Amino acid sequence: MKSRFFIPVIAVVAAGGAALSLNAQDQPKPKLEFKFNGDPRGGAAMEETLRKMIERMGLGDEGREQMEKALEQWKQGGEGGRGTQQQQAPQQQQFRFEFKDDGSGPKMFRNGKEVKPEDLGELMGPMQKQLEEMFKQQFGGEAPQGGGNPLEEMMKELQKRMQGGGTPGAPGAPGANPLEDLMKRAQKGGLGGPRTGRERSRFSKQHTAALAEWRPLTKAARESTVRVLRDGEQVALGTIVSADGYALTKASEVDKGSLEVEFENGRIVTAKVVDKMDAYDLALLKVEANGLPVGSIVPEEVAVGTLVAAVSVDEDPLATGVISVPARSLSEKTKGALGIEFKMDAELDGTGVPIGKLVTGCAAEKAGLKPDDKIMAVNGQPVPYPATLMRIVSALKPGDPVKVRYAREGKEAELEFPLSSREELLKVRQEAILKETGMKQLPDRRALDPTAQMGSSLSGNASGYPKAVQSDLTIDANECGGPVVDVDGRIVAITIARAERVSTYMVPGKVVADLLSDLKSGKFTLAKDEDTLRGELRESEQELQKAEAALKEAEARRSAAAEQLKKFEKK
Amino acid sequence: MTMLPPYAVRGLAAAFTVLTVPAAFADTLKERQAKVLSVVEKARPAVVCIQSRSGAAMGSGSGVIVSNDGIILTAAHVVDGTGGGKGPTEVIVVLNDGREVKAKVLGRDRNRDAAMVKIEQGSEWAHVEMAKAETVEQGEWCIAMGHPGGFDPQRGAPVRVGRLWQNNDKAYYRSDCTVSGGDSGGPLFDLDGRVIGIHSSISMDLAENRHVPIGVFHDDWERLMKGDSWGNMNKLLSGSEDLTPKKKEKPEPKAAPKPEKGDTPPGPREPAPQPSAKTAVWLGIVMDVVDGNITVTEVADGSPAQKAGLELEDVILKIDGKTAGGTGDIAARVRGASPGDAVTFTVRRKGKEQDISVTLAERK
């Protein structure tokens, strides 16, 4: 005789409002459905759990009433819910576990077809992750780790049984059935309590009701999103950019270890980095899959004030926010600099900016400007204040000739000279500070301002991008590389760095689209940005000059040696 | 054996959808976006950076112009002296376009972290309206601006959007618009571009960004205009982080370098040290200093505090028999305890004192 054993995690699935799907992407979207066996106490326990969840949702009276109604419908096995039109009824997918009393071991069936133990790893990994995710969302806290995680225990137990045989203990025997344990612990509230009142405050923008506004809009984007796993741990997200298995992700997070990607439907496949673009910290991944959904990335600039959501593979977006600052360069290489320090404590009258110090070896010093000279105009534009001067000069390119009008001891004059780069200027300044302080390395700006780090895990690589748009999306460091959608559900950017408490940088859609043009033409190489190319040009020219000099020197030595040799030959 | 009919879960899942997706979700988002875009355009020119310079040291905060003749709302700690000094009488105001003007410090209400300054010369300053306190609603969407990290001419004032999840006029407002060092004194706007709060402090929680309620400025208006400075900030700020970058002094040998003003930005980025792990104990209240009293302004559902019977508006007098000097005393006591420990609060509720013992739980 067979006994059947079904996992009641459906309660979690249901309350999370998310479908747990484990089959291949190209099939119609399935709904994972776990069923509990004939034990009525199981059903009652589930009901209890659901009621608990409803309580914890922090809903108002009206919401509670609707939830209760839904719960009744759920108990009766009905469809119910006005939302069925919005939430398309998905195709059912059944998982069934059979345990035979003859000790031959349990079998797992998916839609009636047996799942072999060797396929289990692929199924169990993502399943557990998704369940943990759901617990995290549902209970507002991390699913307990290690031995304290009943899900993990449950999965382990299941896996063990699937592989090694054995029968489940008699229902109800303490500790014998991991499902019973799960239920008991859920009822005791041992599955991670709410962290704080505010995090699940119904007035918060991260509350499920506020996030749900975005669900229909993020649907397409999340299907073209993958989790990027390094040695089994999520280190980033990826955005699928071609149907035959290419995805963009954050390069500095995937520079070592064995890589895999996990799709929205839970499938995990191996991946490798095929190309990188250092300037944007982007990597191109090739994954072993075909027929993937590709998100459409719009090559438009997005205005400050545009509402956006950071998308993951889950139904709810990771975070919602706004475009904080329009696209700008974060690369000091591209920005021009005079090479001056402003005079602190100077009385500014709006006619110009007095120089405090000149930065050694930079443009202004070479051109002959002096401390206390007052800079009045740059390329004919007045520069009444430091910020105006900085804004104008930074927008120019290093090496560009610049006309500087200045006043010295009451007399005005003009100089024209090529600009330094901010990178050069910084290097000189930093060396001076290191020398002055005896430090080996300058701390991060973020280390100098602790408030910049509060509340988030920050990306290590978070600067230098030739063009980045800034948002306030509160993602974590291991959630970069995923798409960002606007209120029309269009992908307008890809997140590249969680920079500070208030800022997340994103590569604009326009840049991504340009980079991908090569990909589409069959050359799987990320284009290099202008700065990198200019840098390479400068470097190779310098190397060429050196090589030419070395060649000349070698030639001279050769002829000198040949000349001297002649003397011996004569003898 | 026959299988039971499957537990149909779609009904429940769908119920969530019904609950959470308003019928016209896209319109709502788009309407909200239209408002945000309009506030950005209109209000951004009124957002300023406030620098108090003395010698080589400089502190940088934010503010917002609320009148034609250049009255600026800011936080008291932006224009207050360090080490109990009187504070500067004059500050530099950097406007959104990079112009710098001098401004006179008017008054400071240190109890509420409110202050005003006024641009010394000129008129026709781009400015915004102040909201009436009674129009501010819990849960309303709001927009934060300011100059985190100081004025950056290539960046301007970053825009942030969130919701006002707590609007207790007697305490701080709290929103999930993230702000950080340098934002202090900057404005929190409603979707009509009116100032509803002024950034004051934050905690480790991304959702905990505290703002001085706009009502404080209405109530204090005359005193602040007259130039009065009063109150004590220590009590108010205890237990949270000050948003003004610390005064940047000349570097001591072997000490951290001084970030220079000039066309020299700070050093290269390295991975920042990550904040240490959060405390493991959970009490479940939010406290504020209201009229000089440590007051419970939020009790989390299902929290140990709620179970033990702590209520909104309870005034905490003592913790474990010791007089609580500030919210920091209580936070320190709780952080120092372990899950399962009992902590006794002596509270005043409706004029009566009582002891409430709370068994702390583990914070997940």
Image: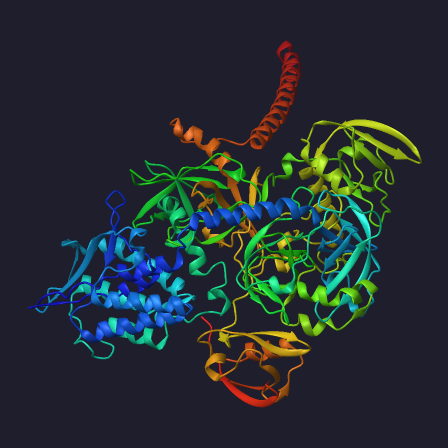
**Res. A292 in view:** yes
Identity of the residue furthest to the top in this view: A570
Which of the pair A562/B67 is nearer the observer? B67
Q: From the viewer's side, name the closer residue of A156 and A497.
A: A497
**x%, y% of residue A435?**
74, 50
Relative placement, left or right, of A169 versus A325 is left
Left or right: A195 with respect to A143? right
The quadrant of the rendering that contains the C terminus of chain A is top right
Q: Residue furthest left?
A: A1
Q: Position of residue A385 (x, y in %)?
A: 79, 41
Nearest the eye: B111 or A292: B111
Work out whether B108 lies above or below A540: below
Q: Position of A101 compared to A190: left or right?
A: left
On screen, residue B238 versus residue A351, left or right, reads: left
Question: What percent of the width, then of the height, locates residue A535?
Answer: 60, 31
Residue plotted at (33% across, 45% down) = A270
Task: Please tell me which residue is depicted at 24% across the width and 49% down the height of the picture.
Answer: A23
Say whether residue B271 is visible: no
- Which x, y percent locates residue A29? 26, 48
Residue that appears at 73% across and 39% down: A390
Which of the 4 image quadrants contains residue A375? top right
Q: How many marks?
A: 0
Task: Please name the colour scheme applied to the rendered image.
Answer: rainbow
Q: Quadrant of the N terminus of chain A?
A: bottom left
Quadrant in which residue B323 is drawn: bottom right
